[in-house]
Amino acid sequence: MKPSLFDYCSPQSVGEVVSALSADPGAMILAGGQSLVPAMNLRLASPTRLIDLKNVAGLSDIVVEDGVIKVGAMVRHRDLELDETAHAANPLIREMMHYVAHVPIRNRGTVVGSLCHADAAAEMPLLLVLTGGSVTAVGPDGTRDIAAGDFFQFHMTTSRASDELILRANIPVLPDGAGYAFHEFARRQGDYAIAAAGAIVTLDSSKSVTAARVGACGIASTPVLLEAVEQAVLGMQLTDEVIETAARKAGDAVTLPDDMHATAGYRRHLLAGLVRKALGEAAERAAGGPVA
Ligand SMILES: Cc1cc2nc3c(=O)[nH]c(=O)nc-3n(C[C@H](O)[C@H](O)[C@H](O)COP(=O)(O)OP(=O)(O)OC[C@H]3O[C@@H](n4cnc5c(N)ncnc54)[C@H](O)[C@@H]3O)c2cc1C
C-alpha cells in the first residue's frame, strides 16, 4: 500500500519544529522513520504533514552529567549502543539494546522515536521505566520533564501533547554497586518481545537486597514495574528459593488477553522464568560474581 497524501517540511531549529507542530494538529514528527513509515504505508497513520528532524541542530548528543545519560532526539539506537561513556554509566542499556530489532534498523531508528512510538513490547520504554528515567518535552509553553511512569499511558499512547517535541530521554546512571540483567523471549532474534523482564538490585555487605527495581514489557498495555516482586526480595538474601518465590509473584502483572502470539497463561509462565533469570544474574553481578 501507499501512504495517503501529506506535506513535508524540514525545519532547522527546535523553535521551528514547535511552530510547525502548533500550526497543524495533524502533523507528525519524522525521526528515523522505522515505525512511522511502515505505519503510513499501512494507513495506520495518516499525518497531514511530516516534520523531519534530520536537519535540526543539536539533537544528536549523548551527554552524561549529574547522574543522568541525556540522549538527544536524533540519537540512533546504534549510536547509544556503541557509546562507551554511556555504557560505562549504565551497562544495562547495551544489554537491552541488543534485543531491539536488527542492526540496520538500529542504524536508522532513534531511541526517543522508540519511546514516542511506545510499543508496549519494546525494550527502550521498559529501560526508561526500569531505571526511573524521564523525557524532556518542549512545546509552545516551554519545557517540562515527564517521568517514565507518567509518559507511557497505553499501547502506542503517551502523555506527550500533540504540539510537543520530545527533546531528549534522561536515563539515570546505574547506582553504585548495583547488579543488572535483562532477559527476553521472542519468536526470532529482533522480533518484539512476547515477554521480557529486567532487574536492577543493590546488596549490602551481608548480600541482602537494599534496593530492587524489577520490570517487564510485552505483558500489559505499557511497560510495568513488578512491585510485588520488588517487595518480595527487599531485605532478603537472593537464594534460589527467595528468587523462585518472588518470580512467581510476577504473574499478576500480566493483563494482556490471549493473542495470536501467546495465551495469558503462557505469558505468566514465561514471565516467571524471565524474572527468575534476571534476578539471579543481577544478584550475581551485584555480588561481583560471574554471570553464566
Ligand atoms: C522490522 C522491524 C523490527 C523492529 N523490532 C523492534 C524491536 O524488537 N524492539 C523495538 O523496540 N523496536 C523495534 N522496531 C522499531 C524500531 O526500534 C524503531 O526505530 C523505533 O520504534 C522508532 O524509532 P524511529 O526513530 O524510527 O521513529 P519514527 O518511526 O520516525 O517515529 C515513531 C513515532 O514517534 C514519533 N516521534 C519520533 N521522534 C519524536 C520526537 N522527538 N518527539 C515527538 N514524537 C516523536 C513519530 O511522530 C512517530 O509517531 C522494529 C522496527 C522494524 C521496522
Image: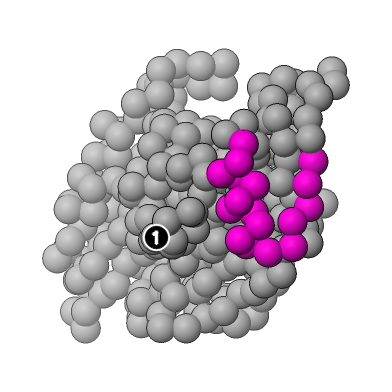
Residue 202 horizontal/vertical position (percent): 29, 72
Residue type at mark 1 is Arg
- Helix, strand or loop status at disc 1: strand
Instruction: Work out whether residue 26 can be spotted.
Output: yes
Q: Which residue is mark 1?
A: 144
Question: Residue 215: x percent and y percent?
Answer: 37, 49
Q: Is residue 163 above or below residue 68?
A: above
For residue 107, above or below residue 172: above
242 relative to 164 in the view: left or right: left
Quadrant of the displayed image that contains ligand 1? top right
Closer to the camera in the image, 191 or 64:
64
Q: Residues within 10 Å of mark 1 (few under 14, many from 20)?
A: some
Which segment is the magenta one?
A: 8-24
- Residue 123, x across and y down, in percent: 54, 49
Q: Name the residue at 62% across, 62% down.
A: 14
The tally of labels here is 1
